[in-house]
Image (cartoon, helix red, strand yellow):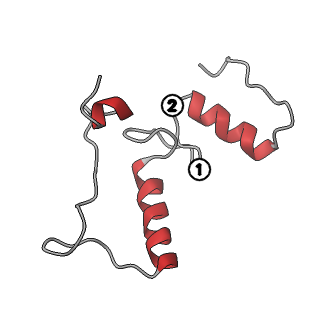
């Protein structure tokens, strides 16, 4: 997959690096193997969610509290369609 031609029209070096990692099945941020998410590995996705929570001033979800529980996909539900009950 690394031999695929990545379009570079007007893209920054960072955007080209991220696109190449995603095309290889790796995380766009750190380069580790992805499992459940389209662009990020599990660790980077959790870090992004934590930073967003802190920035918004929210606390993490806890059982018995308001809102629905966070969705953590297992290896059988990799595609977005499968996560929504579609195939």
Quadrant of the image containing the C terminus: top left
Does the rendering let one see residue 79? no
The correct choice, above or below, for 48 with respect to 41 in the image is below
Quadrant of the image containing the N terminus: top right
Taking the view exactly as shown, the residue that stands out farthest to the left is: 64
What is the x, y in percent for residue 69?
23, 61
What is the x, y in percent for residue 86?
28, 27
Residue 2 sits in which quadrant?
top right
Instruction: Check disc 1 and report its element: helix, strand or loop.
Output: loop
Residue at left 22%, top 73%?
66
Does the rendering let one see residue 75? yes
Taking the view exactly as shown, the residue that stands out farthest to the bottom is: 57
Badge 2 density bin: few <14, some 14–19, many ≥20, Cα 10 Å: many
Along the horizontal axis of the image, is 69 left or right of 48? left
What is the x, y in percent for residue 53?
44, 73
Rendered image: mark on residue 41: none
The correct choice, above or below, for 23 with respect to 11 in the image is above
Badge 1 density bin: few <14, some 14–19, many ≥20, Cα 10 Å: some
Q: Nearer the viewer, residue 63 or 4?
A: 63
Give the distance between the C-alpha atoms of the residues marked 1 and 2, in whole angstroms.
12 Å
Question: Residue under circle 2?
Answer: 25
What is the x, y in percent for residue 83?
29, 37
Taking the view exactly as shown, the residue that stands out farthest to the right is: 10
Question: Residue under circle 1?
Answer: 29
Instruction: Check disc 2 and report its element: helix, strand or loop.
Output: loop
The correct choice, above or below, for 48 with respect to 21 in the image is below
């Amino acid at each position: 997959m690394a031999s695929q031609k990545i379009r570079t029209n007007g893209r920054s070096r960072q955007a080209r690096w991220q696109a190449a990692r995603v095309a290889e099945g790796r995380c766009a941020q750190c380069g580790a193997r992805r499992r459940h998410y389209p662009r990020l590995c599990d660790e980077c996705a959790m870090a992004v969610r934590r930073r967003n929570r802190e920035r918004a001033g929210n606390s993490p979800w806890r059982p018995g509290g308001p809102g629905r529980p966070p969705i953590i996909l297992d290896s059988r539900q990799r595609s977005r369609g499968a996560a929504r009950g579609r195939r």
